[in-house]
Image (cartoon, grey):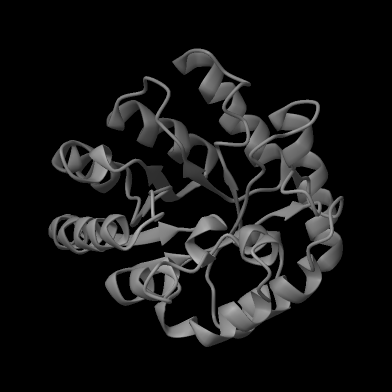
Amino acid sequence: DWSSDVCSSDLFTVRDDYKNPSELKKVLRKIKEMGYEGVEFAGFGGLSADEMKAALDELSLVPVSAHFGSDDISIKADENFSYLQKIGCHFAILAYADTSTVENTEKVCSLLKDAAKKAAEYGITLGYHNHYHEFRTLSDGSMPIEHISKASHLEPDTYWVHYSGNDPMKFLNDNEDNIILVHLKDGDGSGHPCALGEGENTIPEIVRTAEKIGMEWIIVENDDPVPNGIEDAERSIKYLKGCM
């Protein structure tokens, strides 16, 4: 059975809990003390690559992955992929893209293909993190996620898969050969994310499915933590430990 050593905390959850590099280091320590063994970055909080590596090494905290915007993996690709290489982080993820039209989706796929080639030069694997809009039908009858999955590896956000009306476990099983990481997220029926165990997503079943398809890491995230990121992340890891 799994244990909490496969759990990574997405730092987007705690984005409002630090305002400077010193405070970020304290947040990293709290994340480790909760029982998370890895982190997924959403920005680097003003720390240089050397400073970040030193902070992570001190805590024995694994830099699992990092979320980026479109410009970060195109215009600023060398800068960001070099940073990840220096801290020993092997996954870069496009966090969001506009896939509202066939043309936009084609542009996203082209961006992902080009960025994946550049990332590979640094020993980094690129993936795509979905929301629910990628499951909406386009004018040609297809869904954006169908095209994206052919252009890129995936980091499925299991709550947004669920919210889109799809079965997260089926999606994981159907795409297991292309999935590099799994985002574990809970939420209610109105599109509002919650701490794990506080929403309607099928968290235990998703965890078991992620284990079955061989995921090395599952990443806990909440877009809108209550009352703050630290307390929300702590409730999530406590619930998750009870599922494992």
The image position of residue 153, as x and y in percent, is 36, 70
**Which residue is pictured at 67% across the width and 43% down the height?**
222
Quadrant location of the C terminus in the rendered image: bottom right
Q: Residue at x 32, y 60 (%)?
A: 105
Residue drawn at x 40%, y 78% is: 178
Residue 125 placement, left or right of 12: left
The quarter of the picture where residue 182 lies is bottom right
Direction from residue 104 to residue 52 in the image, left or right: right
Q: Residue at x 28, y 56 (%)?
A: 108
- Picture mark count: 0
Q: Is residue 210 something that shows in the picture?
A: yes
Return the residue nearer the eye: 108 or 137: 137
Asked whether 185 or 208 is in front, the reply is 185
Position of residue 29 relative to residue 26, above or below, is below
Q: Is residue 65 above or below residue 105?
A: above
Please provide percent x and percent y for residue 113: 20, 64
Q: Is residue 136 left or right of residue 237?
A: left
Question: What is the quadrant of the N terminus in the image?
Answer: bottom right
Q: Which residue is situated farthest in the front direction here? A: 139
**Is there any visible trace of residue 244 in the rendered image?**
no
Where is residue 32? Give x, y as percent: 64, 40
User: Would residue 4 be found to the left or right of residue 140 on screen?
Assistant: right
Q: Nearer the viewer, residue 10 or 59?
A: 10
Residue 115 image offset from top left, x and y in percent: 20, 55
Q: Is residue 133 above or below residue 13?
A: below
